[in-house]
């Protein structure tokens, strides 16, 4: 089976999916008075697995998770620190690194953003036939896994 036509269609669909999800994130984060970059950084810090005694996650970890430059993460983080949503501290084990953690106000904002995104997802799920909803979720999981594996093997603009 020739994968080229499917690959071309999938590429177009991924661009469209990215566009509509960015618009949804921008809408939900905009309601909270944040830029999309600030919203994404807060959500990334919130999802980083930090143990109960962990001081936070490093800027470089967040940069890798979001696929952004460290300088971009630093600039966005500084803005969130000024808003009182994020704490940025020197890593006591490596003074060249900075650790990011949510403040109590940051945790509240993440909860608000997550609630808005869940409401958006619920509205989208309601538009699908009930019998297809679980299959869509499973398909998205498969797609994300495949995209992550494909990303490891190639360079942009080969």
Image (cartoon, rainbow, N blue to C red):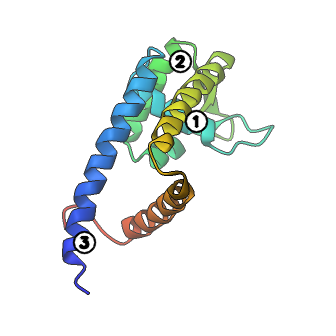
Q: Give SS at disc 1.
A: helix
Q: How many marks?
A: 3
Q: CA distance from mark 3 to mark 2?
A: 45 Å
In front: 154, or 60?
A: 154
Can you give x and y, in whole percent of width and height, for residue 124 in the image? 45, 40
Residue 97 in view, yes or no: no
- Going from N to C along the chain, the mark reached first, 3 or 2, is 3
Residue at which label 1 appears? 45
Location of residue 129 with respect to 72 vertically, above or below: below
- Going from N to C along the chain, the mark reached first, 1 or 3, is 3
Residue at which label 2 appears? 81
Location of residue 151 with respect to 116 vertically, above or below: below
Residue located 22% across and 84% down the image: 2
Q: Residues within 10 Å of mark 3 (few under 14, many from 20)?
A: few
- Going from N to C along the chain, the mark reached first, 2 or 1, is 1
Residue located 26% across and 50% down the image: 15
Can you give x and y, in whole percent of width and height, for residue 27 in the image? 39, 24
Can you give x and y, in whole percent of width and height, for residue 114 in the image? 57, 31
Relative to 110, is 77 on the left or the right? left
Residue at which label 3 appears? 6
In front: 129, or 158?
A: 129
Image quarter hosting the C terminus:
bottom left
Residue 26 in view, yes or no: yes
Which tag is nearer the camera, tag 2 or tag 1?
Answer: 1
Q: CA distance from mark 1 to mark 3?
A: 36 Å
Q: CA distance from mark 2 to mark 1?
A: 13 Å
Residue located 51% across and 12% down the image: 83
Q: Residues within 10 Å of mark 1 (few under 14, many from 20)?
A: many
Q: Residues within 10 Å of mark 2 (few under 14, many from 20)?
A: some
Number of the label disc, if any, that sits on residue 84 = none
């Amino acid at each position: 089976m020739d994968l080229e036509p499917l690959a071309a269609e999938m590429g177009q669909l991924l661009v469209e999916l990215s566009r509509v999800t960015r618009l949804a994130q921008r809408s939900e984060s905009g309601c909270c008075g944040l830029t999309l970059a600030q919203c994404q950084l807060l959500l990334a810090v919130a999802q980083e697995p930090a143990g109960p005694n962990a001081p936070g996650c490093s800027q470089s970890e967040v940069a890798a998770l979001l696929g952004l430059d460290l300088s971009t993460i630093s600039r966005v983080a500084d803005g969130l620190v000024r808003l009182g949503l994020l704490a940025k501290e020197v890593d006591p084990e490596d003074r060249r690194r900075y650790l990011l953690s949510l403040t109590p106000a940051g945790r509240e904002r993440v909860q608000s953003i997550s609630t808005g995104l869940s409401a958006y997802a619920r509205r989208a799920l309601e538009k699908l036939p009930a019998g297809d909803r679980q299959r869509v979720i499973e398909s998205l999981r498969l797609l994300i896994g495949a995209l992550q594996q494909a990303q490891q093997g190639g360079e942009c603009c080969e």
